[in-house]
Amino acid sequence: MIWFRWVGALLLVAMAYGAGDAAAQLRRDRTVQPSRQASPGQAAPGQAPGQAAPEMRIAAVVNDEVISVFDVITRMRMIMISSGIPDSPETRQRIGSQVLRQLIDERLELQEAKRQNVIATDSEMTAATQQIEKQNNLRSGQLNEILQSRGIDKSTLTDQITASIVWAKLVRRLASQTVEITEEEVEEATKRAGEHAKEPQSRVAEIFLAVDNPAQEEEVRHIAERLTQQMKQGARFSAVARQFSQSPTAAVGGDMGWARPDQLAPDLAKEVAQLKVGELSKPIRTGGGYYLLLVLERRAGTGGSSAGGEAEVYDIVQVVFPLPAKAGEAARRAAMAEAESIREAAKDCPTMLQIGKQKAPQLSSEGKLRSTDISPQMRNIVSQIGVGHASQPIVQRNGVGVIMVCSKSAASAAAATSREDVSEVLIRQRLDTVSRRYLRDLRRKSYVDVRVGQT
């Protein structure tokens, strides 16, 4: 039997997995109707618009535990910071009910872990936090500093990480009793991969929102449409996937890796074939729920010539001087001057990064980016910067930045699919199924009373 190396990555990238079901059926025995109160971020009945909301009001009761409106608002703020979704009353209205469902599912996962005596160790929590910091080019301890500077309690992130770690353990435990990937299955899948190896491939990212029963259909569709709109307005697909997707690929920003048409469900394969590189799909209804797809790259099959849309990889250093959303003209001029001074002083990438860490530590970073992972506007700027040169100051949504390109290279060519790759895909699919059924069963046997509106 081939076991669960994939789960190790899941435990390390803990901020993503198990974040919740976008269309949870909230019920006690059958269905619990929500009270007629305001959604998180929306004025309560009898409360004047703009008046401070009673944040400690109960948002939901999960068995014997309470989720407050404050909990929902704090999680929304963290999600908007991490994903680039703008913080506005309209946005809070759009994502409030989904965030509440995430918190409900996390509470169910934590309660089940307590019942099963499953815990997240200190070393696992530390590793998960360090992995998040590494993925975001932050130094050790900087994540907590950023949360504090935005007025977000550390427990908001800690609770999410803890739930994801213990849920991964619970799923692994259940899967060990019910899931077995046989050598015959791996052999057949590997053979099939070899037969189709020369076919064109697409690297696809996904966001999956499950529909557990027909009553959830309209609600989940609305959530999918709202997330689509937010991403078209600038929210990062990978960050949205980590926070909202119900697929195990959420742990890696929704990245499914390279796939041939025969490896995707027919409805998904048809949509992928019609998408351009960097294009986001409309919500796609399948038997299990709704998918949002993004084509990251395309290439010819193994041994073929490069297909159109092959990505270029940029090694860059970026320094951004942050600006609040309603910054005055004086603050904007000061940030532009700081950015210009770095552009003139930095003669190479190490120097620019060092200066950035001194002057703008929160938003200074280095790393490799594929051209297909960058917005079209930013891709156009980066592609015109020579190696070892810095850009002119760039006005961004969160501030004024400067980018230096350290190197450029072509993306690696397609490689033959290994037995290990095949086995991990099979394992991921089985764990996905186990996780969805497990959480669905927990919802059905739990008492969940929603006290705020679900629109």
Image: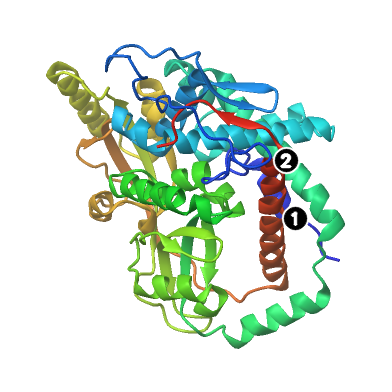
Q: Quadrant of the C terminus?
A: top left
- Between the residue at mark 2 and the residue at mark 1, the CA separation in whole angstroms equals 31 Å
Instruction: Find residue 320 and report its horizontal and vertical position in percent.
Output: 32, 31
Instruction: Find residue 262 and report its horizontal and vertical position in percent.
Output: 54, 80
Residue ID at (82%, 72%): 182
At label 1, counting other C-alpha atoms closer than 10 Å, the crowd grade (few under 14, some 14-19, many 20 or more) is few
Of the image marks 2 and 1, the number of the one nearer the N terminus: 1
Note whether 152 is above or below 230 in the view shown.
above
**Residue 46 falls left or right of residue 70:** left
Q: Which residue is mark 2?
A: 445
Residue ID at (73%, 82%): 188
Q: Which residue is mark 1?
A: 5
Note whether 354 is above or below 305 in the view shown.
above
In this view, the residue in front, 262 or 141, is: 262
Residue 137 visible from this viewpoint = no
Pointers 2 and 1 in contact (C-beta within 8 Å): no
At label 2, counting other C-alpha atoms closer than 10 Å, the crowd grade (few under 14, some 14-19, many 20 or more) is few
